[in-house]
């Protein structure tokens, strides 16, 4: 059977529909079934299972595609850890309603999984990989603190807090 570009386009539309439907349900419902997701998305249960193995995969798909769209609008220069950190903080702040919905459903562990999949390239080895883990988890720690504080500080306020902390350290 030959490659069919149209099937790929249909799958992307189906995935987007499922992701959008689930994202909306996350914010309004407590117990979400596959049937509810499929009805809201207007697709069959088969379409759901053809595209996702679990609702966790839908959340990861949402986070990864939203992060990709964010990076397209706000490019991160390669090897620029400071800009990446700032962009991640801004991204999660901009997605706080979605993050609150994920939290309500006890799925915050998926944000850590996003970091492992997106921030730490699989091909890196040796010390580079360890350094990426340290950077990724320190940023994850900041984002987790933002979530635990219910996003009470804006990214700008966090930036000022970190700058103030650095200047105090430099004076000592």
Image: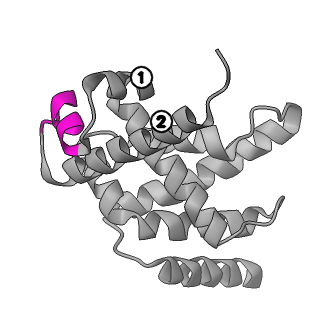
Residue 23 picture location, percent across and down: 30, 50
**Number of residues whose C-alpha sits closer than 10 Å to that of mark 2, classed few (under 14), some (14–19) or many (20 or more):** some
Q: Is residue 140 visible?
A: yes
**Which quadrant of the structure image shows residue 54?**
top left
CA separation in Å, label 1 and label 2: 9 Å
Q: Nearer the viewer, residue 147 or 65?
A: 65
Residue 121: image location, x then y, percent: 74, 39
| Label located before the other in sequence (1 or 2) | 2
**Left or right relative to 51: residue 118:** right
The answer to which of 151 and 37 lies nearer the viewer is: 37
Compared to 160, does 98 lie above or below? Answer: above
Q: Which residue is mark 1?
A: 50
Quadrant location of the C terminus?
A: bottom right
Main SS of the magenta part reads: helix
* Label 1 element class: helix
Cβ–Cβ under 8 Å for marks 1 and 2: yes
Residue at screen point 58% across, 44% down: 115
Determine if the magenta segment contains residue 36. Answer: yes
Name the side, left or right, on which 100 lies relative to 33: right
Q: Quadrant of residue 82?
A: bottom right
Asked if residue 153 lies in the magenta stretch, the reply is: no
Q: Specify whether residue 141 is in view.
A: no
Residue range highlighted in magenta: 31-40
Q: Dividing the picture into quarters, in which one does residue 37 lie?
A: top left
Q: Badge 2 is on which residue? A: 11
Q: Which residue is located at x 36 percent, y 22 percent?
A: 49
């Amino acid at each position: 059977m030959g490659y069919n570009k149209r099937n790929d386009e249909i799958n992307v539309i189906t995935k987007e529909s499922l992701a959008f439907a689930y994202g909306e349900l996350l914010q309004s419902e407590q117990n979400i079934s596959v049937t509810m997701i499929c009805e809201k998305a207007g697709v069959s249960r088969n379409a759901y299972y053809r595209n996702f193995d679990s609702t966790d995969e839908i959340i990861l798909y949402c986070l990864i595609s939203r992060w990709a769209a964010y990076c397209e609008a706000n490019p991160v220069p390669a090897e620029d850890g400071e800009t990446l950190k700032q962009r991640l903080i801004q991204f999660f702040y901009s997605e706080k309603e979605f993050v609150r919905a994920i939290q309500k459903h006890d799925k915050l562990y998926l944000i850590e999984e996003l970091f492992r999949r997106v921030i730490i390239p699989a091909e890196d080895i040796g010390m580079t990989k360890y350094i990426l883990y340290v950077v990724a988890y320190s940023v994850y720690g900041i984002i987790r603190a933002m979530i635990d504080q219910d996003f009470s500080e804006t990214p700008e306020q966090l930036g000022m807090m970190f700058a103030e902390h650095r200047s105090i350290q430099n004076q000592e």
